[in-house]
Amino acid sequence: MPVDEAIPSVRPAPAGRTDGTPPRQRVPRARAASRGGRRAERLAPFVLLAPALLILALLRFWPLLLGVNFSFTGDGDRNGLMVGLDNYRELFGDPLFRGALRNVGLLVLLLPVAVAIPGLLATFIYLRVPGHRLFRSVYFFPAVLSPVIVGAIFNLLLAFDGPLNALLGGVGIGPVDWLGDPDVAMFVVVGVHVWATFGMALVVFLAGFATLDASLLDAARVDGASLPQTIRHVIVPSLSRTIQFVFVTTMIGMLTSMFGLLYVMTSGGPEGSTYLPEYYIWIQQGQMNRPALASAASTVLFLIMLVVGLLQISLLRRAVREA
Amino acid sequence: MSQARWGRWLLAVPMAVLALATVYPLVFTANVAMKTRRDYILDRFSLADALHWENIATAWNSVGMARYLANSVVVVTVSVFLLLLFGSMAGFALSQLRFRGSSVLFLCCLAALFVPFQVIMVPLARIMGDAGLVDTYPGLVLAYVAQFLPFTIFLMTSYYRTIPPEIIDAARIDGNDVYGVYRRIMLPLGTPALLSVGILNALFCWNDVLISLLLMPSADHRTLMVGVTSLRGQYSDDIPTFASGVLIAAVPVLVIYLFLQRQIADGVAAGATKG
């Protein structure tokens, strides 16, 4: 069934209550309630929230603090001892971690492409290109597959003696060692990640388009605007919030959900060229038994994500204002 | 006008090519899974001459896929149930009840949304280890619940805010206490959102590999996705069996996608538009 006629099952919250404050008091205190009953009523919100808050506090916020603390302690013989910034010094001296940071830079550079592809496709679907319903459901489907499965499929396709090279060989190109060439492998993995996730961003864009004022588009059409002009002067400014959101979530996705692909497709190789911070953390924790060093890398990753998020938001704000 | 229509058809061409590129890798894998080894080596692209289901059987039997599948089903089912239970309870409290600190608590849940697993995984592994929960089902379930709860609370809160207060007033006048309102009003009315969020959470948990790899190290506790990663080493020279294993792991999700596509897309869109 096409996603097209979807009635959003989660409707927008009414205006004025988006700040997390509950609605005005309106429940008349149960007249017959005893004093004990009233106390139970007062406690009820906390009882309802207790499991969630307990889990979040214990398994998300506490580890976050613990991790920052770990990163200043030693591994192995110096387990538990405070070692100051030693882990961070080691981290930034490690060519693998520096490579991981370089790859983060590469991701930032590729980010506009990863956002533009679903953005353009969503525009075309919104403009009702023939077959848009079919396209929409086809494009979304890799997004539901696990990175592990996607990685395994592309391992098959991209093997040195695999089908893609056989195809290219047929027209006299290659063979290219897609996953074995340090200059190529990272681009290939990012490409596969984009292949697997652009459907998510596409759906988000389409949700944004649903809020777009159609009369603006009509006006542009009446004025004889070309498609690129319409995109630049009507669609981009009206969808600035959506675009901003997709930028941030795509970057977060690149920083935190490529582990499965890296694990299956390259294991960080060849020559450590496809390391990302998350993969480095995993290797240090899971393989090298260096939890403190891994914690330092975690802290760096967290800072990177904060900076990336804040930077992008402010850059985009400015870009939109100037447009 | 006709020029515009031509333009649309021109756009449809690259889009169709891209659609093919989206589907082809999976079709290729399915085709390879049905071929004999010899056929694959001779020609990678030709259609399978017959459906060689024996590859599927080999993959299924030899690496303990059945065991992995059962592990995944158990862990995902329990995790999603707890996520929906805790998420709807919290969402109800945060959206419809008035109490001191409610907006602070909502912000806490939002903040948790921005703590990625990679950042907390090392200390989390230690906490789980200290509690004796590493390599146990409850440990993995707890980790999944903690991972996806912020998102669940967020969506349930947004959804419950759309329920008119009058409905709750009426239920209160009928003599329900808060818990009665939750059970008799909020749970049934929340069904569409619970379904959407539940499917998304099921996908997230089912597709996870990092958390499972970290917290379920022993071979017979592997979830299906971790199991798939071990296929490669085993069948590096038997590509059809490898492809069969991948296909087995992909089929449940593909079936779910075919039937519940709308809910999945809605959930993603809802998550975005609330941000």
Image (cartoon, rainbow, N blue to C red):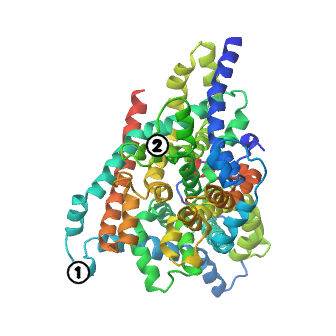
Residue with the mark numbered 2? A247
Mark 1 and mark 2: span between their CA atoms? Answer: 41 Å
- Judging from the image, mark 2 belongs to the subunit labelled A
Residue with the mark numbered 1? A78
At horizontal 56% and vertical 16% (from top left) the residue drawn is: A226
Q: Earlier in the sequence, mark 1 or mark 2?
A: 1
Residue B105 in sight here: yes
Q: Nearer the viewer, residue B100 or B121?
A: B121
At horizontal 50% and vertical 70% (from top left) the residue drawn is: B213
Circle 2: residue type: Phe
| Residue A1 drawn above or below residue B231 | above
- Find numbered disc 2 in the image and state the secondary structure of the residue it sits on: helix
At horizontal 42% and vertical 26% (from top left) the residue drawn is: A323
From the viewer's perspective, is A222 left or right of B216? Answer: right
Circle count: 2
From the viewer's perspective, is A97 left or right of A93? Answer: right
Q: Nearer the viewer, residue B154 or A189?
A: A189
Q: Position of residue A258 (x, y in %)?
A: 47, 54
Residue B100 in sight here: no
- Judging from the image, mark 1 belongs to the subunit labelled A
Q: Position of residue A56 (x, y in %)?
A: 49, 72
Could you classify mark 1 by the number of other residues whose Cα lies within 10 Å: few (under 14), some (14-19), or many (20 or more)? few
- Of badges 1 and 2, the one in the foreground is 1
